[in-house]
Image: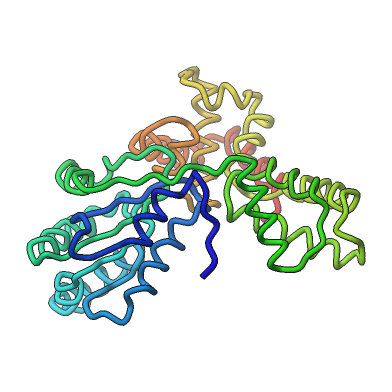
Amino acid sequence: MNWFISEFNIRAWRFINNFQLEKAPDVTLIYGPRGVGKSAFLHYLYQQREQEQGIIITDALAFARQYAYSAQENKLNLFRQRYRSTQLLLMDDLQFLAGKVKTIEELQYTYEYIIENRGKMVITIETDILGLDFLGERLASRFLSGVVIPIDPPQAHELERFLDDYVHNKRLVIEKIVLSMISERTDNLADALIMIRKFVQFAEFHQDALSLTCFETYWKHEESQNQELVVPLNIIRNVGQIMGISVEELLSSSRKLKVNEAREMAIYIIRTFCHSSFPTIGRYFNRNHNTIIMSYKKMQEKLLKDQELITNYKIILKSFKL
């Protein structure tokens, strides 16, 4: 497997590449923003050891679904036997357990059984700033007592090197300035790859060379299309425009009635159409998930009786491709 290793991910790579079960800490927590290779590292570790017995790779949502199904079908003994007897549990995307109290409690017991039997856990979580409050103090403290490894967002020059390696391996002829522009417009490996693939598809469709001129045309087309996408930042912008509140005010600590209502509206629409978790939405507004839940419920109730808000809600939705 080919890897792009640089300063932003070197610590995680060294840990994964030199992993030894006997010497590994009880728990290793790898965290970082979206698209920096956390899941890829976890799967690489699994592939290196998949011939060994007693290793499981899963993600938090799959763990939660399996636990719920087992509880419903009276098969918890089988579920617990599988997870609690493992020697190495690899769990991806821990952030998706936010709000799942029963699943978090089950994970805590799973952790205790694994560690008591000299097993190990390696966990990833998508976050810019590490915070495990959603796990509860007891489990959070257990996980933080192990080794914590951050993967930082790559710098623009690292992204450009990554893209240079990628196009070389794919035998694509793309002007260097285009790779530089892509690296300036993205902040992670995943989005950089998505952009370059879409650019290549755009150029092929228009039977054009992968030139700077073609990229500029592609970029204008993307910006036009992206304005209509139902994504959090577009929702925040459109809610502000339609309800007469600036984006700065929406994201500020202001408690003015009109600002609060616009913020509640944005939160409600993001939750409804983007299906984002409450903690994820909270990061946009610099608020904890309990505050976001309250705002969502308030707007849900208001939209049952406040005609002005109902009208604004319909206008906002019409501004998107739904």
Q: Residue at x 91, y 64 (%)?
A: 206
Is residue 269 found left or right of 31 in the rendered image? right
Task: From the top left corner, tell me how far across and down residue 65 is, in percent.
Answer: 32, 68
Q: How many marks?
A: 0
Task: From the top left corner, tell me how far across and down residue 35 is, in percent.
Answer: 53, 53
Q: Is residue 120 above or below residue 312?
A: below
Task: From the top left corner, tell me how far across and down residue 236 is, in percent.
Answer: 60, 36
Q: Residue at x 40, y 31 (%)?
A: 287
Residue 60 in sight from this viewpoint: no
Is residue 274 found left or right of 100 in the rendered image? right
Q: Which residue reaches farthest left?
A: 116
Residue 106 in sight from this viewpoint: yes
Q: Quarter holding the C terminus?
A: bottom right
Q: Residue at x 32, y 39 (%)?
A: 131
Task: From the top left corner, tell me how far across and down residue 233 is, in percent.
Answer: 61, 39
Q: Is residue 225 above or below residue 54?
A: above
Q: Nearer the viewer, residue 28 or 310?
A: 28
Q: Nearer the viewer, residue 310 or 248?
A: 248
Q: Residue at x 52, y 42 (%)?
A: 153
Q: Nearer the viewer, residue 230 or 181?
A: 181
For the rendered model, the colour scheme is rainbow
